[in-house]
Amino acid sequence: MDSLIPPSGQRDHWPLMRRQFWFYAAMLSVSVMMTIATSLEFGSGARIDACGAAGMASVVTVFAVFSPTSVWRLLGWPRVEPKTAGLLLAGAALWGLGIEGYFFLIRALGVQFVQFWPDFDAAAWPWWAVFVIVCVVPGVFEEIAFRGLIYDGLRPILGPRDALLVEAMGFAVLHLAPLIFISHFFIGLGLGMLRDRTRGLLVPMFAHTAWNTYVIGSEWWATHHALIIP
Amino acid sequence: VEVSIPCVNCVDVIRPTDEFCQGCGARVSSDQKERLLERLEIHDTRMAAHMKHVRSARQGIITLAVLFAIAGLVMFFIAKSESDSTLVTLRALPEDMAYPELINGQSLTIAEVRTMIEREPLQILALNLVLAAIMAGLWFWGKKAALPAIIAALAVFVTVHVANALVDPATIVQGLAMKIIGTVILVRGVRSGLEARRIELAQRV
């Protein structure tokens, strides 16, 4: 941890921190624009979701290109020993069960989750478009944003442990739903740990995409299954 | 002025930002870190000023926690009395009848609308208590690591108000002074926290 503290005691961290705030504000603006577009019915839900995904990807790409710390070095193939990979898989399975348990509890409280399929069904978009917009784009670009840019930006200032906690918190609150804050905080923490253990973003990207696929898949099952088997 | 305290295990000294004693390798305890900070504050007036801002930011966080909890309780009782009066009207209607208006773009039965209305006050209470718990958690964390806790509190505070304004634009002007003061205190806390860390690191060079 000590080695990550910058060698020069005179270094001013405020510009680096300000960059993180601007980046966070840009990501928040995308969420705000999506919410406004949805409530004002600027277009079909599917189009708004697609524009939101494209907006987030653009913001992340611009900040990644102009970032002082290179994100591209994190996109290399992960070097993980088989034993560590096994432990990570077991941990991920337990983590997924815990998150699903939390979702079950808040559903019991009557909280309604955002549904994607009604919008995409109404727009008659193919399944792969849903997969790209809801699973792949957030899986890839949210990882570059939180576990790449924000985590790497905060680590020299706060140290790895505190940077991990702050990025997980930012990830959780940016979903703009306080009742899923707890689950998404742990999701952010788990993905951050994966990034740390595998020293790259590919594994957390894969885990994030897989989780989103599971969520959208279970929603598809709940909304379409009854139609297939009457 | 170089600030240090003696190690309890050996003859060496511990300096600010040390995690371990350079002489015997013993881990620096949180009490020792606090003592070092106190000494730094005594010897460096800039450090004292920055730590004052950091402390007020931490106090701001716990104040926000209390305010979220109180607001949650008040809003719960207001929503409960409103939902009770609406439920009285709905009880006169048959349960399987369709509600005359669309809710969130969906057609619901009277029974479904009743369940929704019954749950609303609890959801408001849970939401505010979650926010209060988050802020209280950040306040506790701030005892050990003030800077990251203040950064996280700032992100939560700003995002919650943006989300609130999206749900109900009328809330933008409600408590505007409080929102501005809260943001200023937290931003100042972050800046001072960074400066304090810079002074601490300068001790090591």
Image: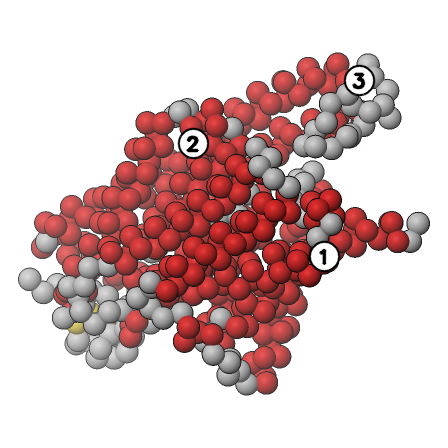
Q: Amino acid at mark 2?
A: Leu
Q: Chain of mark 2?
A: B
Q: Is residue A82 left or right of residue A148?
A: right
The location of residue B199, given as percent across then percent down, is 16, 59
The outermost residue toward the right is A230
- Image quarter (top left, top right, bottom left or bottom right) of the C terminus of chain B: bottom left
Q: CA distance from mark 3 to mark 2?
A: 35 Å
- The answer to whether the residues at label 3 and label 2 have Cβ atoms under 8 Å apart is no
Residue indicated by mark 3: B91
* Chain letter for mark 3: B
Q: Nearer the viewer, mark 1 or mark 2?
A: 1
Question: In this orientation, does residue A101 appear?
Answer: yes
Mark-to-mark CA distance, 1 and 3: 44 Å
Residue on which the image places disc 1:
A126
The residue nearer to you, when weighing B32 against A199, is A199
Identified at 49% across, 41% down, the residue is: A33
Kindly identify which residue carries mark 2.
Answer: B67
Q: Are marks 1 and 3 in contact (CB under 8 Å)?
A: no
Q: What percent of the width, then of the height, locates residue B113?
A: 75, 27
Residue type of the residue flagged with mark 1: Pro
**Whether marks 1 and 3 lie on the same chain:** no
Q: Rate crowding at label 2 as few (under 14), some (14 to 19) or many (20 or more) other CA atoms within 10 Å.
A: some
Amino acid under label 3? Arg
Q: Nearer the viewer, mark 3 or mark 2?
A: 3
Indicate which disc, 3 or 2, sits on the residue closer to the N terminus. Answer: 2
Which residue is rendered at x = 6% and y = 62% of the image?
B1
Which of B44 and B29 lies nearest the eye of the viewer? B44
What chain does badge 1 belong to?
Answer: A
